[in-house]
Amino acid sequence: MYLSEQSRNLTSFCSSVYLAIGLPTVQRAEKEYLFETLSSLLSKSSKEEQETFTIIVMLADRSAAYNQDVLRRIRLFYPDQLQSGVIQVVLGPDMEFIFREEPSKLTFNDSVERVRWRSKQNLDYAALMEYSAKTARYYIQLEDDIQPVDRYFSDIRDFVDNNTFQDSSWARLDMYPNGPIGKVFKSAVLPKLAAVLRAYHQDKPYDYLMRQFHSHVRGYRLRYRHIMFLHQGRNSSLTGVTREIDKLV
């Protein structure tokens, strides 16, 4: 079951804006990053800019109690943003079937645990993309442990608009060099990308499926050449995995 069939908007707001910012969140070991990320996305954008984007937080943890606690705190800290639609909260789909069944095959020399983790990530992203496609003209994929630079939204909009004006056939704009973070898509292509993620969710990680999708659609990819986001999550959502955080140099 996917978000469009089972899950729902928990904050009862739906509108069409310029940019949807997809922000799936799950519980992590040791440290929670979501509220630092939300605070930074809001503090580094103006009120006028916030009228043209929406941050879609998808509660994707396996624990219903944790999801409800995050929702409670978002309602407590951001009532005005929820009312205006600057922040929306949606409940992710039930993915327990992934953890009840053994993967049909192990690829990329990954463990059963990692295959399950990346399969859930693919399906979470697919659900979030399907929902977001109806809310905005463009979509950017983020994670719940990033920090944007100052003027991030105006820089994103300038990069999108300038490239669209010069040649509207672009298929993807990369605002961050690695992984799923910072990839901008036209909302019209999101249902097709979501279908690829669903069909091959167990076979390949998201990065590979995104490249596979890009190779089969018309249009080119452009990369933003300056720092736009810093990945600040030392603790991965995959239990036991840590990473180096990004730093401005």
Image: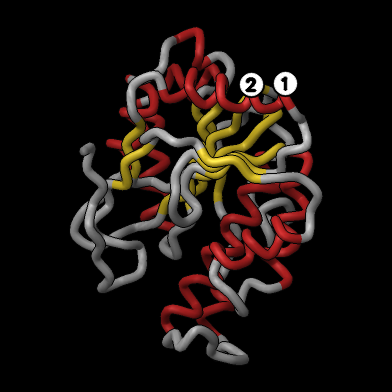
Q: Position of residue 129 (x, y in %)?
A: 65, 47
Q: Quadrant of residue 198?
A: bottom right
Q: Position of residue 184 (x, y in %)?
A: 59, 39
Residue beneath the point at 72% across and 47% down: 190
Residue 162 is tagged as 2
Q: Position of residue 133 (x, y in %)?
A: 71, 39
Could you classify mark 2 by the number of other residues whose Cα lies within 10 Å: few (under 14), some (14-19), or many (20 or more)? few
Q: How is the image coloured?
A: secondary structure
Q: In what element is the residue under mark 1?
A: helix
- 80 sits to left or right of 163: left
The correct choice, above or below, for 111 with respect to 212 in the image is below
The answer to whether residue 9 of the structure is visible from this angle is no
Residue wearing tag 1: 165
Question: Which of the pair 60/128 is nearer the observer?
Answer: 128
Residue beneath the point at 42% across and 41% down: 71
Q: Residue furthest top?
A: 48
Amino acid identity at mark 2: Asn
In the rendered structure, are the residues bearing label 2 and label 1 in contact, judged by CB atoms less than 8 Å apart? yes
Q: Position of residue 148 (x, y in %)?
A: 36, 32
Question: Which of the pair 207/58 is nearer the observer?
Answer: 207
Residue beneath the point at 58% across and 75% down: 204
